[in-house]
Image: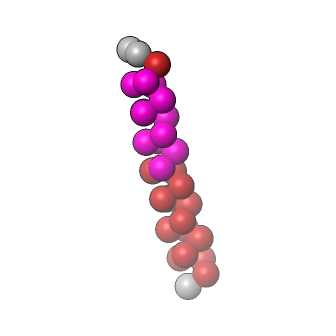
Amino acid sequence: MTIFKAIEMISRALKSVSLVYNVEILSICL
C-alpha cells in the first residue's frame, strides 16, 4: 500500500466522519 493510497483513505474517512457530525449538529439544531 502506497503512502498516497493511505492519505486518500484517511481523507475519505475524515470526510465521512465530518458528514456524520454535520448531520448530528443539524438534527440537534432542528
Residue occupying image coordinates x 39% and y 25%:
5
Q: Residue furthest top?
A: 1
Measured as percent of width and height from the top left, residue 10 is found at 49, 34
Q: What colouring style does the render use?
A: secondary structure
Is residue 9 covered in magenta? yes
Q: Residue furthest bottom?
A: 30
Q: Magenta stretch: give its range.
A: 4-15
Residue occupying image coordinates x 48% and y 49%:
15
- Please say if 16 is above or below 10: below
Is residue 29 covered in magenta? no
Measured as percent of width and height from the top left, residue 19 is found at 48, 59
Residue occupying image coordinates x 55% and y 75%:
26
Measured as percent of width and height from the top left, residue 16 is found at 45, 50
Measured as percent of width and height from the top left, residue 30 is found at 56, 85
- Report whether 5 appears left or right of 22: left
Q: Would you say the magenta stretch is mainly helix, strand or loop?
A: helix
- Please say if 6 is above or below 14: above
Residue occupying image coordinates x 49% and y 59%:
20
Q: How many marks?
A: 0
16 or 3: which is nearer to us?
3
Please identify the quadrant where the N terminus is shown: top left
- Please say if 29 is above or below 14: below
